[in-house]
Image (spheres, rainbow, N blue to C red):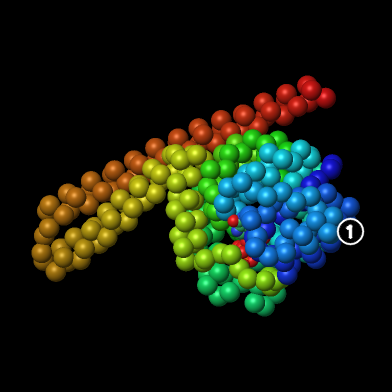
Amino acid sequence: MNATVVIPTLNEEKGIGGVVESFKNLGFEVLVIDGNSKDRTREIAEKMGARVVLQTGKGKGNAIAEAFKLVDSEIVILVDGDGSYPAEEVWKLIEPIEKGVAEHVVGNRFAKYEKGAFTRLNLLGNKLINLFFRFAYGVDLTDILSGYRAIKKEVYKSIEIKKSGFEVEAELTVETLAKGFRIAEVPISYKKREGKTKLRPIRDGFRIGKTIYELIARYSPARYLYVFGLILLFLGIATGCYVVYAWLNAVSHYMLALLTVLFIITGVQFVVIGLITDLIFRTTLEFRREIRQVFKRKEI
Ligand SMILES: Nc1nc2c(ncn2[C@@H]2O[C@H](COP(=O)(O)OP(=O)(O)OP(=O)(O)O)[C@@H](O)[C@H]2O)c(=O)[nH]1
Ligand SMILES: [Mg+2]
């Protein structure tokens, strides 16, 4: 399958040369989508043999959305222009797509990262966001914010990117799942970046968290019921414990006891309704995938 490497850049003159060169040496076409760099990024990328396009909007998300329209290869490889991801490991990302086991493959940076590749804050933020993602979506992924990915044409041509900045990785992940495609993670090594970071950890971290929460609606709205039901259940358990504790000390709280029952019954109902609706949603997704495959087989 033919693949194009897409590199979004913003002032990456230190790293871009090496990144383009290493992918060119492996025989890939390279598209650099630049966010109006004020340094020599575009000049260096062109010299190394990349096709360089200036993005029209602002932000990494917009750049990637634009690149998806420009490219037409069977696979798109997404990678940063800062030299943090090794080109030689690209085959690990392509393999699951070629074998037909996934349509979107993510390089898991936690497998083997160089000292200093993550700042302490970034490491903590990444772990928290992944934990929140697993809780909210019930999908077992460990590095949803990785910038090294391989995405099949049917996926990158069908997903909608609405967020403009660093929320793009979260959106790519959720959109893939919501459209019923399969995501696989493969371990990759992760190095300390060249040049200066463009990420503002606190501001962007919160934006990403908010995006993950908002995107539940696109994935499976039923999961909001889960979260709400679980909160009610916890409240019920807390007030229930207090009522029992007071009762053991010979104080009775009738109203609070009634409220506890209400919390627990409504909580359980929300969780159960959430479970059933989520199941229906997932089954529909499975059907959509099957139907797509049947059509594809017919085309062949
Ligand atoms: N085209 C474009 N690229 C951007 C923009 N902002 C960031 N990038 C590029 O997106 C890639 C990821 O940005 P990074 O600053 O490396 O963010 P990160 O990988 O999350 O964090 P660190 O590598 O730890 O600094 C880099 O190649 C940036 O140059 C933008 O507004 N437009
Ligand atoms: Mg980076």
On screen, residue 33 versus residue 243, left or right, reads right
Q: Is residue 184 visible?
A: no
Indicate the quadrant containing the N terminus: top left, top right, bottom left or bottom right. Answer: top right
What residue is at 70 percent from the left and 35 percent from the top?
A: 154
Q: Residue at x 51, y 34 (%)?
A: 281
Ligand 1 lies under 8 Å from the Cβ of mark 1 = no
Q: Which one is nearer the viewer's eye here, 51 or 64? A: 51
In the image, 34 versus 29, the foreground residue is 34
Q: Quadrant of the C terminus?
A: top right
- Is 268 placed above or below 196 here? above
The quadrant where residue 13 appears: bottom right
Where does the image place residue 186, in percent across and percent down from the top left? 72, 57
| Relative to 277, 90 lies left or right | right
Percent across and percent down for residue 239 are 23, 58
The answer to whether residue 226 is above or below residue 287 is below
Spot the residue most to the top.
298
> In this orientation, which residue lies closer to the viewer: 16 or 116?
16
- Quadrant of the rendered image holding ligand 1: bottom right
Q: Amino acid at mark 1?
A: Asn
- According to the image, label 1 marks what residue? 25
Residue drawn 63% across the image and 44% down it: 65
Q: In the picture shown, does residue 168 fall above or below 130?
A: above
